[in-house]
Amino acid sequence: MPTLYEVIRRPLITEKGMTVKETQNTLVFEVALKATKTEVKQAVETLFKVKVETIRTATVEGKERRRGKYSGYRPDWKKAYVRLKEGEKMPEYLDSL
């Protein structure tokens, strides 16, 4: 069983992520590629002390990157949309930056 910080890599702070956070009561995280929805749910509930309603995950394929004649691929990664239950206070992870 991986630790909490191995499951949740970092919050995704993008314009789309902030819009979803404000309108749909949902947090967006980059998570470990092999993390399951159950592991993500337990990690979020333990770290932020909130109740999770649903989780959606998406695996993002790495893009091709070129440097002159050399080409390669960025690694694949996984994104998790974590919806909190009604009435839960949204954690402010931007305050610690």
Image (cartoon, grey):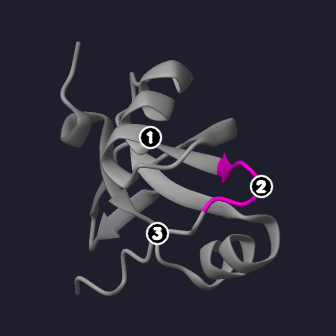
Q: Earlier in the sequence, mark 3 or mark 1?
A: 1
Measure how far apart labels 3 and 1 are at the Cα level.
11 Å
Badge count:
3
Q: Residue at x 72, y 60 (%)?
A: 87
**Disc 3: which residue:** 91
Which corner quadrant of the image does residue 58 belong to?
top right
Secondary element at image label 2:
loop
Is any part of residue 76 visible from this angle?
A: no
Q: Based on the picture, tell me whether residue 35 belongs to the magenta stretch.
A: no
Q: Residue at x 55, y 25 (%)?
A: 37
Residue 30 shows which numbered tag? none
* Camera-nearest label, 3 or 2: 2
**Disc 1: which residue:** 45
What's the residue type where badge 1 is placed?
Glu
What's the residue type where badge 2 is placed?
Glu
Secondary element at image label 3:
loop
Is mark 3 in CB contact (under 8 Å) with mark 2? no
For the N terminus, which image quadrant? top left
> Residue 55: image x %, image y %?
66, 37
What's the residue type where badge 3 is placed?
Pro
Q: Vertical placement of 11 versus 5: above or below? A: below
Which region is colored magenta? 83-88
> Residue 10: image x %, image y %?
32, 59
Q: Earlier in the sequence, mark 3 or mark 2?
A: 2
Which corner quadrant of the image does residue 48 belong to?
bottom left
Q: Earlier in the sequence, mark 1 or mark 2?
A: 1
Is any part of residue 45 visible from this angle?
A: yes
